[in-house]
Image: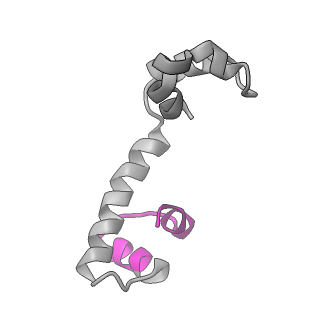
Amino acid sequence: MIQFIDDHKDEFGVEPVYRHLPVAPQTHYAAKVRPRSTRAVLDEISTEKIHAIHKANYGVYGVRKVHAELHRNGQRVARCTVERLM
C-alpha cells in the first residue's frame, strides 16, 4: 500500500488518498523512516536460498523437499515459513 501511494502521490497527494483508507497518513510517513523488521530481512535471505534450491532442482521441488534441503545445508527455517515464501 505504501508503494502504491508513493507511485501516485504526485497525482493525488498522500493525505487525500488516506481519507479513503482505514489508516492514518502518519502510518505512511512512519513506514518511510523506520528500519526494516527482522522478519523482512530474514525472509529476503530465505527467499533467495529457496529460489536457488528450487531452480537447481529444475523447479520440481515442493515445500517438503525444499525444506529438507535447507536443513541439510544448515539453514534452519520453519516449514510454514518455506510454504509462505514459496
Residue occupying the far left of the picture: 56
Q: In front here: 22 or 10? A: 10
Residue drawn at the location 53% of the way across and 69% of the way down:
83
Residue drawn at the location 28% of the way across and 83% of the way down:
57
Q: Is residue 13 left or right of residue 20?
A: left
Q: In front here: 77 or 86? A: 86
Provide the residue span drawn in magenta.
Answer: 66-86
Residue 80: x and y in percent read 57, 66
Residue 49: x and y in percent read 31, 63
Q: Does residue 30 appear in this view? A: no
- 22 w.r.t. 52: above or below: above
Q: Main secondary structure of the magenta part?
A: helix
Residue drawn at the location 55% of the way across and 15% of the way down:
13
Q: In front here: 68 or 4? A: 4
The quarter holding residue 7 reads: top left
Residue occupying the far front of the picture: 11
